[in-house]
Amino acid sequence: MENLLLLHGALGAASTLEPLQQALQAHYRVYTLDFSGHGGNILPEEPFSIDLFAQDVLRLLAQQGIESTHIFGYSMGGYVALRLAQLQPERIKSIFTLATKFGWSPEAAEKETKLLNPEKIALKVPQFAATLAQRHAPQDWKHLMHKTTAMMLQLGAGPVLTSETLPKIPVPAQLAVGDRDHMVSVEETLWAFRLLPSARLLVLPDTRHPLETVPVQRLSKEIMQFTRSLSFQSAPSH
């Protein structure tokens, strides 16, 4: 049985991936983790960054004795996975991203972070605020959101994955995006797909950005088909 690591998105936690984990655990050794400051983990003094979260993954691999693994990354989790594949490609068998934003610029970051105002969210979307409070307790979700905002602005100023770095990532990847995703465009996903040397593109019909809008059965099936196709390709011919 092969290893599969599931990585959550910004403001998410390992708990958001539990339905997918349950759907896949009969087929893989499935691992999840909470990134620094997420899911109740202590908020680090240092700024949030893609590299900080990549180190979280490397720490988990060391703790669990995992030499290599497939990775599914939702949204920011996919960005972290590709950064990790850039740093240590031998540790990653494949990457399946869903709703990962590749088109970072100062304008894009400004647009994204306008939505991350804790005071407005607490006032106008109290149910979402309560969800975040529960998800990240005992940490203050408002501090988490401020640190996420700062990371996004930094990504806008200097993206980690660029037209120079993506072609150097040799790991097989499948980039999935919903055709109704208002945060991540098909066009920016296509841009990354064309730059990666070993990538596939999957556009999910009638699908928006939130993970819960993607049927678990459909997503788990796509992940299994992708990893199994790689195993088939690498099998010796007779």
Image (spheres, rainbow, N blue to C red):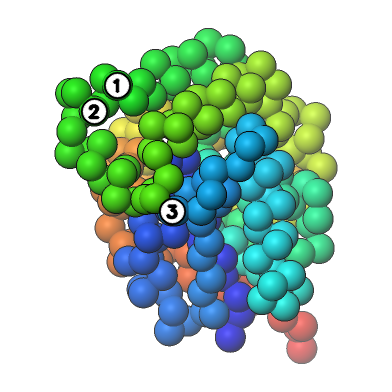
221 versus 102 height, above or below: below
Q: How busy is the neighbourhood of tag 2: few (under 14 within 10 Å), some, or many (20 plus)? A: some
The disc labelled 3 sits on which kind of residue? Answer: Gly
The disc labelled 1 sits on which kind of residue? Answer: Glu
Q: Nearer the viewer, residue 74 or 15?
A: 15
Alpha carbon of mark 3 to alpha carbon of mark 1: how far? 20 Å
Q: Position of residue 220 (x, y in %)?
A: 40, 66
The numbered dot on residue 157 is none
Q: Nearer the viewer, residue 238 or 218?
A: 218
Q: Are marks 1 and 2 in contact (CB under 8 Å)?
A: yes
| Residue 66 located left or right of residue 27 | right
Q: Nearer the viewer, residue 22 or 149?
A: 149
Q: Residue at x 51, y 65 (%)?
A: 32
Q: Which residue is mark 1?
A: 119
User: Quarter of the image containing the C terminus?
Assistant: bottom right
161 versus 233 height, above or below: above
Q: Dot 1: what SS?
A: helix
Is there any visible trace of residue 217 in the rendered image? yes
Q: Which residue is mark 2?
A: 122
Q: Residue at x 65, y 55 (%)?
A: 56
Where residue 96 sits, quadrant-wise, is bottom right
Q: Which residue is mark 3?
A: 39
Q: Dot 2: what SS?
A: helix
First reached walking from the N terminus: tag 2 or tag 3 = 3
Q: Position of residue 179 (x, y in %)?
A: 35, 36
Query: From this viewpoint, which residue is outermost toward the bottom?
Result: 238
Q: How busy is the neighbourhood of tag 3: few (under 14 within 10 Å), some, or many (20 plus)? A: many
